[in-house]
Amino acid sequence: MKALVYTGSRSVEVRDVPAPQPREGAVKVRMAYCGVCGTDIGIYSGKHPRAQAPLVLGHEFVGRVEQSVEGSRFAEGDRVVAYPLISCGHCHPCRNGTPHVCANLRLIGIDRDGGMTDHQWIEESVLFKVPDSLSDEVAALVEPLAVVVRTLHQARFALLQSAVVMGAGPIGMLTAIVLRHAGASNVIISDVDPGRLALCQELGFETVDVRNASLVEHVEAVTRGDGVDTVFECSGVESAALDMTKLVRVGGTICLTATHKSPHAMNLIDVNFKEITLIGSRVYTQTEFGSALALAETLAAELRKTITQVVPLSDAAGIFDMIAAPSINTVKILVDCQS
Ligand SMILES: [Zn+2]
Ligand SMILES: [Zn+2]
């Protein structure tokens, strides 16, 4: 059985791996597609604090139930996506109704083998049935879409508010799409990648190329100096941490959607003087994952446009070079697990 295996810092291989063994409460899922995520890039770079080689990558997968178990909610042939979080059940956050921020949180595809493979046994308690109307490709976007649902909830984003999305990677782009659907009055999205910005424009968003323009000045101009209601920081880059407080209005909200991997400097005086609400966001609850699945049906046509490449599993060892290559325009890459 083939799988994309992380084998050590900056090294992945498509390997023949032994077929995974059945587990209690798990059903056998034949994988269709699995999305490549920023977290996978972090693992590949060797900087992920928990991922240990050898590891089958992939937490954004969709597949078909190939072998069910007695009394299961799922029948053979059902298409499914998985809520990939594994919480401990006994830490303070778990005991207080927030197991998605479990102190010992683990994920399928990070802490144990994931979905970039032929098949995997997955606990049926974390599986969601994919409706017939949703394609496999778009269903593979439910996990990143759930991140976006969480971030809008954390920001308490309200109808007719304006927003800046910093960073037009897969999460930033999905955030902009969902914000428009959620009734944003205006969405401005920034990035340094011309290909990603061109796609944002094609999707109808106002863009700022921060290689040659100031996002702070642009927002000042379009809001007559007031700033926007909410800033979604989806880039994780150092300069964004310093700029974000300049973009938001007095009394506005900044939501940290991206993970800043080091303690970047930000202007705390702005937080006081503008009474800014600064809030973090981490993964999603099971309820939000379910909402994302429903939202994927509504937004399928737009979401599909963020999938820039579908790579066969047999060629998947090249995906990280593809992402790094300036000549290749990538947003969301899917691995086709059966080819
Ligand atoms: Zn992801
Ligand atoms: Zn816990």
Image (spheres, helix red, strand yellow):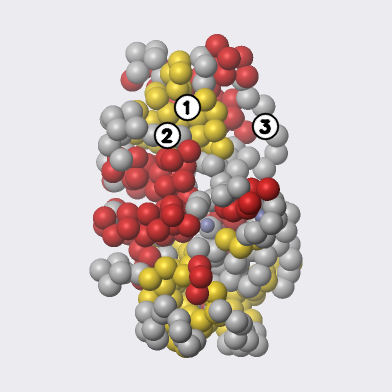
Three-letter amino acid code at the position of disc 2: Arg
Left or right of 8 on screen, residue 102: left
Task: Specify the quadrant that holds the N terminus.
Answer: bottom right
Q: Is residue 216 visible?
A: no
- Helix or strand or loop: what does disc 2 sit on? loop
- Where is residue 209 drawn, in percent x and y? 43, 34
Label 1 or label 2, whichever comes before in sequence order: 2
For the question of whether residue 223 can be seen, the reply is yes
Q: Residue at x 59, y 30 (%)?
A: 241
Q: Which type of secondary structure does the marked residue at label 3 adopt?
A: loop
Residue 90 is situated, as x and y percent measured from the top left of the image, at 69, 56
Residue at position x 59%, y 53% in the image: 99
Residue at mark 1 to residue at mark 2: CA–CA distance: 9 Å
Residue identified by numbered label 2: 156
Name the side, left or right, on which 295 lies relative to 97.
Answer: left
* Residue 258 spot, x, y in % from top left: 55, 42
- The residue under label 3 is which amino acid type? His
Viewer-nearest of labels 1 and 3? 1
